[in-house]
Amino acid sequence: MIGELYALAAAVFWSLAAIFYKKGLGAGAIPAVLIRTFFALLFIFIVYIIIRGPHFNFTLVAFAFLNIGGVLRLILGGAAYMKGLETISVSRFIPILFTFPLLTILLSALLLGEEIHTEVIVGTVLIVTGIWILSKGKGTVNERNIRFGVSMAVLAAFLYSFSIVATKTGLNEVDPLQSVVISMPIPLILLYAVYSMNNGAKTIFKFRKMDYILLGLGGIMGMGFGSYFFFVSMTHIGAAKATSLASITPFLSSMLALVTLKEKLQPALLLGTFATVAGIWIVM
């Protein structure tokens, strides 16, 4: 049961992280990615040094795949995540984002030659229906551009799927805790370099103190605890089952958004969320 428990724990921390990200997005999407990644890396690196000491043991192949996964998840996927969350509600964004388990299965079928069963077809229909309902529902408080936000959620889901395939390959040779540490520094440096060239090296230090706190806590919860628990789960029960159990995240996120962000769960959002989550469970 340890793999299942870790997957559910990842879902809890990802849900909490989404709330903190939403509250701290006054800094803007790209700075938010930088800030959350920095604090997550700092936290997980300190934990690693305390537990293991300054000892790393990984192959070049594992390093390459973990960093490919990191770039897809942290830079490209992270930017799409924040851009989408910036424009639509948590309760609309997260259910669409969590179509990535299905996309992961489809990628596995295409890249690894795995068979696609009838359940995948039925689940796909439900998920597409759910996304359509979520994209058509009326806007709630602070939703500025539903179509753009939904597009970013779908893009982030695709990027996360490719990231999982790459990360799972790297996890074959490196333990989960070390994998989290390895996958962050290069993507963070690359994003900071690009951001600094466009905005100046010191711009990242000019946001509100509360933005740093909220995004930092979100990064520690989502990218620190959440990623570690998910990586452990994948090593025990595989990527498909781990992502299946973690797909409870949309429900948890919506409930947390209802309480903490005062978002209104309209009938269309509830129906779309139900269809999307049901599709994922059928597939799994």
Image: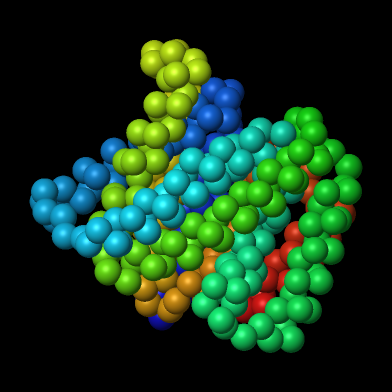
Q: Nearer the viewer, residue 199 or 223?
A: 199
In the rendered image of this protein, does residue 238 appear above or below residue 260?
Answer: below
Left or right placement of residue 263 versus residue 23 in this view: right
Quadrant where the N terminus lies? bottom left
Task: From the viewer's perspective, tell me whether residue 86 is left or right of residue 112.
Answer: right
At x 68%, y 43%, the residue is 152
Between 254 and 243, which is closer to the camera in this rendering?
243
Asked if residue 40 shows in the view, the reply is no
* x and y percentages locating residue 278 in the rendered image: 73, 72
Q: Residue at x 80, y 70 (%)?
A: 126
Q: Position of residue 47 (x, y in %)?
A: 23, 48
Give how far across and how far down residue 244 sits, in percent: 57, 72
On screen, residue 35 versus residue 81, left or right, reads left
Quadrant where the C terminus is found in the figure: bottom right
Q: Nearer the viewer, residue 126 or 169?
A: 169
Residue 223 visible in the displayed image: yes
Q: Is residue 149 shown left or right of residue 192?
A: right
Q: Does residue 245 sit above or below 39 in this rendering?
A: below
Seen at 35% across and 64% down, the residue is 170
At which x and y percent is residue 98? Answer: 63, 59
Which quadrant of the figure has residue 166? bottom left
Give the tally of numbered discs: 0
Q: Which colour scheme is used?
A: rainbow
Q: In this view, does 241 lie above or below 269?
A: below
Q: Which residue is drawn at 62% across and 56% down?
A: 158
